[in-house]
Image (cartoon, rainbow, N blue to C red):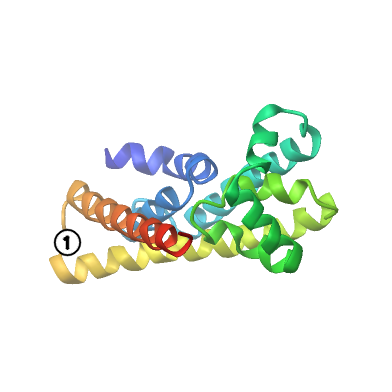
Amino acid sequence: MEALISEYGIWAVLIGAGAEGEAVAFLGGVLAHRGLLVYWQVAAAAALGSFLADQFFFFIGRHAARFRFVERLEATTAMRRATGLLERYPVGFILSFRFIYGMRIISPLLISRTSISAVRFLVLNGLAAALWGTAITAIGFLFGNAVEVLFGHLRLHIHLLIALAALVAGIAATAMVARARYR
């Protein structure tokens, strides 16, 4: 298993960060801590995967606005809330949406429907993806260090199960707080 991770792990982080996001970037950081992947490569892959996915959704929103799923997204409560934030703080919104749970896919679609230029989004999205990729993988790396300090040098599968359980618990707690906040 370690050989597969070492061979294909960076590609998995690149694709996974674009498709899923935090969990993959976080686990990439844990694997970098274990020495199976190189940290800067994991951070770069997470940033690039996130950047490419967001550029794709921006393109979809800009050029496929007539698609029914885009129209349905624009009618949702989350999209209306996001529109309000975007109209008040366009640069701050673009730099931070990937850090807000549940905003990852709808935000580039929303941004594409505004007057923000594609070049401006490209630059801000690149900066935000670099910050996000570095931060989330660093959290995974540091978490791997904390687990090792607490439990010693665990076998890989136990280490990953602990990291995954902590990540799921964190995402669930964030979702519950967000839901309670918007009720």
The amino acid type, in three-letter code, at marker 1 is His
Q: Picture coordinates of residue 120 (x, y %)?
A: 81, 58
The quadrant where residue 171 appears:
bottom left
Q: Is disc 1 placed on a helix, strand or loop?
A: loop
Quarter of the figure with residue 66: top right
Identify which residue, 42 or 83, lies in the foreground: 83
Determine the residue positioned at 76% across, 55% down: 121
44 sits to left or right of 60: left
Q: Is residue 122 left or right of residue 2?
A: right
Instruction: Give the residue number, with chain letter if any, for mark 1.
Output: 153
| Quadrant position of the N terminus in the picture | top left
| Residue at the image position 51 percent from the left and 57 percent from the top | 43
x, y percent for residue 174: 39, 61
Please say whether residue 140 is visible from this viewpoint: yes
Residue 162 in the image, given as x and y percentages of width and height: 22, 55
Give residue 96's quadrant in the image: bottom right
Nearest the viewer among 19 and 152 is 19
* Residue occupying the point 28% across, 68% down: 145
Q: Quadrant of the C terminus?
A: bottom left
Q: Dot 1 surroundings within 10 Å: few (below 14), some, or many (20 or more)? A: some
